[in-house]
Image (cartoon, rainbow, N blue to C red):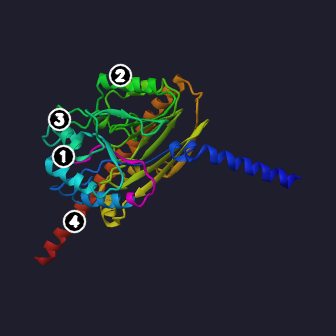
Amino acid sequence: MKNKLIKIVITVCLFIAGSVGVQAFSFRNMTLDFVQISDTHISVDREDTAYKALGSSSALLKDAIEQVNEIKGLDFVLFTGDLVDSATVDNYREYYTLLTKLRYPTLNAFGNHDLSYGGLDKSVVLNIVQKCNPNYTFSDTFYAFSPKTDYRIVVLDATISDRNTSNGELSQEQLQFLDNELSQNQDKIVLIAIHFPSVQPFVAQEHALLNAAEFNEILIKYKNPIVVVSGHYHATKIRKIGNIVFVSTPALVTYPMAFRHIKIVNYKDRVSFDFDFISTRLEDVKEKNRQSVISYATLAGYEKDRQTNFVLKKNHHKSVRYKRNKIKNASKTTKTKKREIKKLMQHKELKQKKQKIKRERKFKKEKIDQQ
């Protein structure tokens, strides 16, 4: 009797499934699966610096594209600024030539190197991007769209294009634009892409988003899951504050020379996040750069900043005050990193002085021996 009932239930389930059809439920509609690449700094005419492997910028992006093409089922690839090291026609030509090998659609936020350096006007750069990228159908450098029913993506432009600066600042128009988008999409997961992080991975005021406090005050008013992805600092950090996740992704041209594969799954009562950290396969380039940068460990972050997964419950109970204090405390803790970096710099300078003295003594000794 029991087996007979089981067979009847299975038959009914199969009949319902057949009558509803495969379009009634799609796991893909629940999932946003994308890659974030930041600070590619493509340059056709510059050599490596102590901080950026500019001479290998094209090779590094080519390797990243090959690795991305091996990932199945991505929705898109998002570049979070500093696509080129300076805004020149040659650099943009090289960047988009490399992207022709990418199998997935791309979108981008703009960084200070894309608009503030190189001499091309913002309107000229925007025109280049619109013509070279068929997916960039937007009329400005900030925009919003919904790739799937449960998701809203907001891309902001905090570049200060009237002068050469590493600082960023959002216009009042964009702050209002962000507030409106969040207000109208409180039933969705909102992904915000901006080159300049509003919560710094380490303190560097000369790189800061000048009105980060205003930006964060808008975010903390809302209770739906919000993810902010950024670059600029070339550092690796993930901070979860209430219903907001702040993601800093490293540069492709600076150690650890990596990008992120991010998978978000939207359930009825929760949202799961899976961050996969993918580093360049050009090990010789990475090792050479590691030896030249200051505090490479800070740039690489902790393991939880690179490879991690966690769940956010919906209708988060954390108050505005809690989130505001958490963000302030996050800024305070980065001061410790600043002191560590300062000590490392002093240590490096002292080591270099000692090596210089040692070389000078050796040279004098050899000179005396020759006499």
- Specify which label sits upstream in the sequence, 4 or 1: 1
Residue type marked 3: Ser
State whether residue 113 appears in this view.
no
Residue pointed to by mark 4: 359
Mark 3 → mark 4, Cα distance in angstroms:
53 Å
Badge 1 vs badge 2, beta-carbon distance below 8 Å? no
Q: Secondary structure at mark 3?
A: helix
Residue pointed to by mark 3: 123
Q: Which mark is residue 86?
A: 1
Q: Residue at x 17, y 33 (%)?
A: 163
Q: Nearer the viewer, mark 2 or mark 3?
A: 3
Q: Nearer the viewer, mark 1 or mark 3?
A: 3
What is the x, y in percent for residue 276? 47, 53
Q: Is residue 32 left or right of residue 79?
A: right
What is the x, y in percent for residue 75? 42, 48
In the image, residue 75 lies in the stretch drawn in magenta: yes
- Specify which label sits upstream in the sequence, 1 or 2: 1
Mark 1 → mark 3, Cα distance in angstroms:
15 Å
Mark 2 → mark 3, Cα distance in angstroms:
22 Å
Q: Secondary structure at mark 2?
A: helix
Badge 2 vs badge 3, beta-carbon distance below 8 Å? no
In the image, residue 105 lies in the stretch drawn in magenta: no
- Specify which label sits upstream in the sequence, 3 or 4: 3
Q: Nearer the viewer, mark 3 or mark 4?
A: 3
